[in-house]
Amino acid sequence: MTDKKMNVESFNLDHTKVKAPYVRLADIKEGQNGDRIHKYDLRICQPNKDHMEMPALHSLEHLMAELSRNHTDKVVDISPMGCQTGFYIAMINHDDYDGVLNIIEQTLNDVLVATEVPACNEMQCGWAASHSLEGAQELARNLLAKRNEWTEVFA
């Protein structure tokens, strides 16, 4: 490993020291007009030990992207990590960490009672065959069961 600071924030995070699940403020970017984007690392699986299966991850992405916006108009984007261990959540002008935790909790509770995956069809999704509502709900259930651990990033 290098001591050189890299451009991507998560590449500077020692993934062997974190303890999933957690929610961590990963970055803040300020626009020229004063808007601030807060990027949160929602880590669901322990890095290099576990990962989400793609159909469950994909469905959780669709569900969270759609349902989170029922709780706030501050969500810019919810993006899955390529390593399949979590998501990045970008919020505009919303720096209330506890508020973000509550939005995530409310959204995951919505996932538990969902009866279908939003936009799970060939017209609205680039790989509509790769979805699992049950898998997404299991991920949400497991994450909610550890809600009291979300603020503890490091082991």
Image (tube, grey):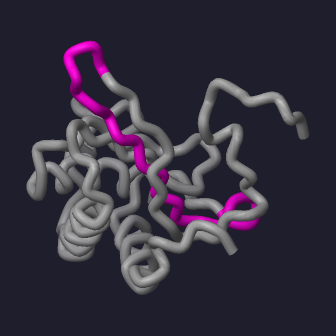
- Using the rendered view, name the quadrant where residue 52 is placed: bottom right
Residue 81 position, x and y percent, is: 54, 44
| Part of the protein shown in magenta | 31-50
* Percent position of residue 103, x then y: 22, 62
- Left or right, residue 111 beside residue 54: left
Let me know if residue 127 is in the magenta part. no
Total of numbered circles in the picture?
0
Between 122 and 72, the residue placed more toward the observer is 72
Q: Position of residue 88 (x, y in %)?
A: 44, 45
The correct choice, above or below, for 19 with respect to 71 in the image is below
Residue 127 visible at all: yes
Q: Residue at x 54, y 73 (%)?
A: 152
| Residue located at (78% from left, 60% from top) | 16
- Which quadrant of the rendered structure holds the N terminus? top right
The quadrant the C terminus occupies is: bottom right
Q: Could you tell me which residue is drawn at 9 percent across and 55 percent down?
A: 70
Q: Is residue 148 above or below residue 67?
A: below
Residue at 62%, 41% (x, y): give it: 10
Task: Tell me, yes or no, if residue 122 can be seen here.
Answer: no
Magenta span: chief secondary structure: loop
| Residue extending furthest toward the top | 32
Is residue 38 magenta-colored? yes
Return the x and y of residue 39 as percentages of the image width and height: 40, 42
The residue furthest right is 1
Please indicate whether residue 12 sits to the left or right of residue 78 in the image.
Answer: right
